[in-house]
Image (cartoon, grey):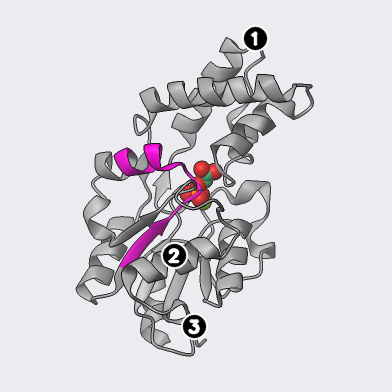
Amino acid sequence: MKLARFPVRAVLFDLDGTLLDTIHDLADAANLTLAEMGRPARPLEQIHSFVGKGIPNLVRRCMTEDAEAGEGEIDQAVAVFRRHYADVNGRSTRIYPGVIETLEAMRAMELRLACVTNKAEAFTLPLLERMGLTSYFGAVVSGDTLPVKKPDPAVLHHACELLGVASPQALMIGDSANDALAARGAGMPVLLVTYGYSEGMAVDTIECDGLLSIATGALDRIAAA
Ligand SMILES: O=C(O)COP(=O)(O)O
Ligand SMILES: [Mg+2]
């Protein structure tokens, strides 16, 4: 399968569900927030399906799924979540198998690498640092870097500009429909990992250029392109 009309010069990685398994920290912060807001805790699997469109969306869903909440209460819950997440961010987060090998191999291939996430910058940058990933990336575009986030393709174009690469020469690797739609909108190929969050959707129902059961699989796809 040809991934691109041009040789791949850059790879843009999603963060949550693709590079890092962050669900335990997100769920801990969500349940601490619900407790403080006087709401019952939610199961991990449900919180799992709320991850992908940024923190405000995660908190809104925690507050309104099968429940009522006014806008003021939701805003308050977002502020409470940010306080708790700042405390727990990275504590139970793990790097997925194959990720470091993949980043190392891509660096050795002189591919330019970026991280493009819907997580807010105040949490993204310290998390990359804590997990030892910062030095791999020539650019990091977070959920509040621009006024829009994925699935808006503008964030992928922005990452390519920062890397000095034309968008059709970049490959996106993610775990959700947000990543796939953003890549399609930006005119770049996209591979999806099967071990991520995908907002409760079956990942094989999302239109993309290929599925990866482990991140290292991207290396063969790039070599074959
Ligand atoms: O913060 C989120 O909702 C998920 O962020 P992601 O774009 O890294 O998957
Ligand atoms: Mg993701």
From the top left corner, tell me how far across and down residue 204 is, in percent: 65, 63
Magenta span of residues = 113-126
Whole-percent x and y of residue 170? 42, 75
- Name the residue nearer the viewer: 30 or 221: 30
What is the C-alpha distance between the residues marked 1 and 3? 49 Å
Reading the image, the residue beneath label 1 is 38
Q: Whole-percent x and y of residue 13?
A: 42, 60
Label 1 vs 2, first from the N-terminus: 1
Q: Mark 1 belongs to which amino acid?
A: Gly
State whether residue 30 appears in this view.
yes
Number of residues whose C-alpha sits closer than 10 Å to that of mark 1, classed few (under 14), some (14–19) or many (20 or more):
few
Q: Amino acid at mark 3?
A: Leu
> Disc 3 designates what residue?
3
Is label 2 or label 3 in front? 2
Residue drawn at point x = 36 percent, y = 41 percent = 94
Q: Is residue 122 magenta?
A: yes
Closest to the observer, 152 or 207:
152
What is the C-alpha distance between the residues marked 2 and 3? Answer: 21 Å
The amino acid type, in three-letter code, at marker 2 is: His
Q: Nearer the viewer, mark 1 or mark 2?
A: 2
> Mark 2 sits on what residue?
158
Residue in front for this viewpoint, 141 or 175: 141
Q: Secondary structure at mark 1?
A: loop
Please say if 83 is above or below 149: above
Label 3 secondary element: loop
- Report which quarter residue 102 is drawn in: bottom left
